[in-house]
Amino acid sequence: MAAVCLAALTLTACGADDSYTVPETICGLPVDPALVEPLLPEGGDLKVSAYGDPAADRNVQCVLSVDDEEAVRIVSSRHPERIADPVGASASMFDLRIWKPVPADLGERGAVASNGAIADVPCATDGAKYLTVRMELRWLHVPQKTPDKDYKPAVTEFTRAFTAAAAEKAGCPT
């Protein structure tokens, strides 16, 4: 049985602009803050919570909250089967409500929308064959909002980088 760990990091705004600094490590994985910043709403406090260890656990969840509101949720899982239809999976699986996803180059299979993405990459480790990373911009749902811009490019770049970091940490062969 995999141990579950909870790590939380809170970054509080300092200064008049009421903004936070995005860390260089998100839930134990190195990610360029410039890829994270466009995905987050404005606010004063950023809290990053990790549930599980990307190196040891098959299922890991990472939540970025701004001012105590869930902003971004990332779930990675190692499993024996690849996702046959990432567009359909991203629209209906894993408690993600991704709007109008389209196929994307995010590994072996992937899909992206303005509010989230799903990536599936080979990962033959510990009885698993694939690693799937799913991310959703939760702040666009509270209240139900229409995106004020197309987040697909930012979602794509972040998901690609996060997936690569998660695959490396999990020991997926390249």
Image (cartoon, helix red, strand yellow):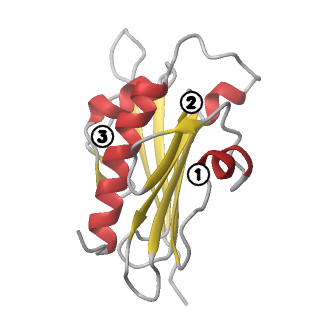
Q: Amino acid at mark 2?
A: Asp
Q: In terms of secondary structure, where does tag 1 sit?
A: helix
Of callouts 2 and 3, the N-terminal one: 3
Observer-nearest residue: 65 or 55? Answer: 55
Front position in the image: 161 or 34: 161
> Which one is in front, 117 or 30?
117
The location of residue 79, given as percent across then percent down, is 53, 76
SS at mark 3 in the image? loop
For image coordinates 68% across by 46% down, the residue present is 96
Q: CA distance from mark 2 to mark 1?
A: 32 Å
Q: Eyeballing the image, is 115 above or below 54?
A: above
Q: Are marks 2 and 1 in contact (CB under 8 Å)?
A: no
Q: Callout 2: helix, strand or loop? A: loop
Q: Which residue has dot 1 on it?
A: 86
- Per the image, the residue denoted by label 3 is 23
Residue ID at (53%, 43%): 111
- How far apart marks 2 and 3 lie (CA) works out to 16 Å
Neighbourhood count class around disc 1 (C-alpha, 10 Å): few under 14, some 14–19, many 20 upward: many
Looking at marks 1 and 3 on the same chain, the residue that comes earlier in the sequence is marked by 3
Q: Tell us which disc is closer to us: 1 or 3.
A: 1
* Quarter placement of the N terminus: bottom right
The C terminus: image quadrant = bottom left
Q: Position of residue 73 (x, y in %)?
A: 56, 46
Q: Which residue is mark 2?
A: 67
Image mark for residue 99 = none
Please give the name of the residue rendered at 62% of the width and 16% of the height, measured from the top-left corner.
147
